[in-house]
Amino acid sequence: MKRRKSILASFLVMAILLISQSLSAQEGPQKQKTNSFWLDFGTGLGLVNHYDNGVIPYNIVGVNYNARLGFTDEWKRCHIRFEGGFFKSAIVEPEGNTYGVNLDLEFLYSCLQNKGRWHFWSGGNVRSFNDLHLIPKLENNQAALSMFGSIGAVELVQCDFAYDKAKKHPWLTAYLKFSLPLVGIASRPGFAYLHDDEEVLEFFAIILSGHETFAKAFPGCTTDIGLTLNLRNGNRIGISYYWDYFTTGKKGIYHYDNAYHNINLSFMFKI
């Protein structure tokens, strides 16, 4: 009796497997994925040239490094990228540090795709940048927080080369990206950022008090010139020179200039 039950159970298992296989075969071929998705990581090192008339009335030059994290998604003729970056600048004179957090959402559309080499993209971005100064020697002006948000236009040109023997896989891609802010909003402090009051413990409440918020067209631009190594598994490794300049204008006590000159290393992991 036990033997019959075991044989019957074996037949039931085999029947279930055959039915499942036949059902999966009837589903037909699956649609191929039309998009490519990467997780992006990066780091960089360079110089910062900074001027903030509300903090100190002369240029600040320091060493800058950054870390970035985000993703890139491409489908058909569309490209979307999100990146969050952390910047730290060591100020030489007066001694101190500047910290920055940058968020950038970018959408591009392929205007022209040459099957051989060239790719042209055009679109725009939404960007947020927060800048915090900590300079103890400035005493009551030792801490300052500035916040910016902008909408801009973006152009990207890519050129594939160093193809394999089959002329299908380009090992290298050179690119030039240019971004121009069009209009934005800023929140800037007055001169007294942090008073010498030991009883006050709400640090951010103090540095956010007395801020002036205004909207305007911000002069500036961002360029990224680089070279990408395209691996066969879809992963990418890139190196680039990154220059980012942003200013509120040349007049007034809230005059703010910031320029980054970085050599960036990036990694894109396809998933």
Image (cartoon, rainbow, N blue to C red):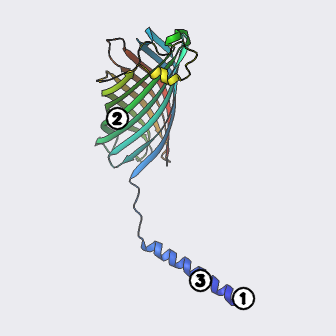
Spot occupied by residue 61 in the image (x, y as percentages of width and height): 48, 13
Labels 3 and 1: the sequence-earlier one: 1
Query: Mark 2 highlights which residue?
Result: 125
Q: Earlier in the sequence, mark 2 or mark 1?
A: 1
Q: Which residue occupies the extreme bottom position in the image? A: 1
Q: Quadrant of the N terminus?
A: bottom right
Left or right, 196 with respect to 208, comes to right
Circles 2, 1 touching at the beta carbon (< 8 Å): no
Q: Is residue 33 above or below residue 267?
A: below
Q: Amino acid at mark 3?
A: Leu
Residue nearer the viewer, 40 or 5: 5
Q: CA distance from mark 2 to mark 1?
A: 71 Å
- Per the image, the residue denoted by label 1 is 2
For label 3, count other residues whose C-alpha is less than 10 Å away and answer few (under 14), some (14-19) or many (20+).
few
Q: CA distance from mark 3 to mark 2?
A: 59 Å
Q: Amino acid at mark 2?
A: Asn
Q: Nearer the viewer, residue 216 or 35?
A: 216
